[in-house]
Amino acid sequence: MNTNPITSRFGDLETIAIAIIWIVTGLILVGGDFVGILSLDRIANLWPVALIMVGAVDFVLQDEASQSVRS
């Protein structure tokens, strides 16, 4: 099967972007706690929301991928 290099590159960037978002978020949280701007105790109750959002984004991406395969 022939794939368009632009399409395959976009898929690779999309996968990398998710990892970059996780890394940057972690650095902001840890750095903010270290500097004293953020308190990890105050944002601890946001983790369930973050997990739900990551799951929703993953579900949408999988749905879009399955629709593009069908086309």
Image (cartoon, rainbow, N blue to C red):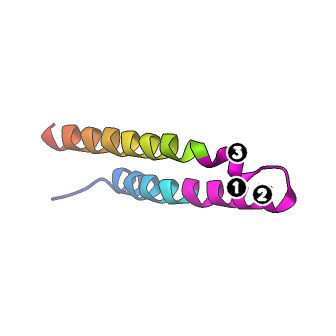
Start-end of magenta stretch: 21-44
Tell which tag, 3 or 1, sits nearer the viewer.
Answer: 3
Q: Secondary structure at mark 2?
A: helix
Do the CB atoms of the residues marked 1 and 2 lie less than 8 Å apart? yes
Q: Observer-nearest residue: 68 or 40?
A: 40
Q: Quadrant of the N terminus?
A: bottom left
Residue under label 2: 33
Q: Main secondary structure of the magenta part?
A: helix
Considering only order in the chain, which callout, 1 or 3, is on the residue closer to the N terminus? Answer: 1
**Mark 3, secondary structure of its residue:** helix
Q: CA distance from mark 3 to mark 1?
A: 11 Å
Image location (x, y in percent) of residue 38: 78, 49
Residue 52: in magenta span = no
Q: Is residue 68 left or right of residue 46?
A: left
- Which residue: 42% across, 51% down? 10
- Where residue 8 sits, quadrant-wise, is bottom left
Check residue 29 in the rendering and tell me which mark sits there, or answer none: 1
Label 3: how many Cα within 10 Å (few below 14, some 14–19, many 20+)? few
